[in-house]
Image: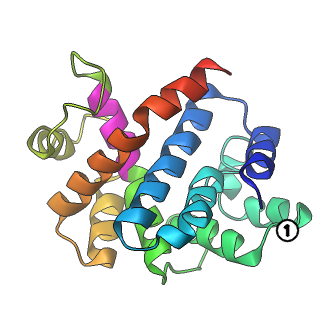
Amino acid sequence: MTRDEAWALLTKYNKDRFHLQHALTVEGVMRWYANDLGHGDQADFWATVGLLHDLDFEMWPDQHCVKQQELMRDAGVDEAIIHATCCHGYGLTGVDMEPTLEMEKVLFAADELTGLIGAAALMRPSKSVQDMEVKSLKKKFKSTGFAAGCSREVIQKGADMLGWPLEELMEKTILAMRSCEADVQAAMETL
């Protein structure tokens, strides 16, 4: 699946700017992680999984990670992408596909965390992740009233799946978001 094909499929079912920005962010984050973890030859695949991971969420939130399997199969999407995107809902939606590959665990762990980091960035004078430090993010993480929709339990479970301390997941995901922040902003300006 090419990037253009993935974008066309995403925008067929997603119009909300917030959802599109999240998809672009997770796409960039997954590309960064692929390179950082020694899977640079699979960076396009990891990025495509990031871009499409919430394909059904805007239109079918009650069927999240279930409906997108049908949508992707109808579009001829590779089963590896379908499995990888759907297992990020393991234990959270009606999906029983457990993340087993490193890439799937990264998506599970980083997806929810990108929302928390994005919300924390908006509170900064710079409105950016470029000057964000783990210490300030940990304070936001501990404040359950801040970005209450971002599940701390899921973020911690993701770190545990990877066998990383929470601080390592936070640090890496901040770096990943720094790497793609300008590209995401530029893409959003064209919408």
Instruction: Look at the image and name its color scheme.
Output: rainbow
Residue 18 in picture, x, y percent from top left: 56, 30
The answer to whether any part of residue 148 appears in the image is: no
Q: Is residue 94 left or right of residue 26?
A: right
Q: Nearer the viewer, residue 155 or 149?
A: 155
As drawn, which residue projects farthest toward the left?
Answer: 135
Q: Is residue 116 magenta?
A: yes
Magenta residues, start to end = 113-121
Residue 132 in picture, x, y percent from top left: 19, 35
Name which residue lies at 39% across and 74% down. Answer: 38
As drawn, which residue projects farthest toward the front?
Answer: 41
The answer to whether any part of residue 170 appears in the image is: yes
Q: Is residue 51 magenta?
A: no
Q: Nearer the viewer, residue 110 or 64?
A: 110
Residue 112 in picture, x, y percent from top left: 41, 52
Name which residue lies at 59% across and 79% down. Answer: 96
Name which residue lies at 44% across and 51% down. Answer: 29
Which corner quadrant of the image does residue 147 belong to?
top left
Q: Is residue 71 left or right of residue 154?
A: right
Q: Where, quadrant-wise, is the N terminus in this rendering?
A: bottom right
Q: Nearer the viewer, residue 160 or 38?
A: 38
- Given the image, on which type of amino acid does mark 1 rest? Arg
Q: Residues within 10 Å of mark 1 (few under 14, many from 20)?
A: few
Q: Is residue 45 above or below residue 62?
A: below
Name which residue lies at 60% across and 71% down. Answer: 84
Q: Is residue 27 above or below residue 185?
A: below
Q: Where, quadrant-wise, is the C terminus in this rendering?
A: top right
Residue 73 in picture, x, y percent from top left: 85, 68
Q: Main secondary structure of the magenta part?
A: helix
- The residue that label 1 is drawn on is 73
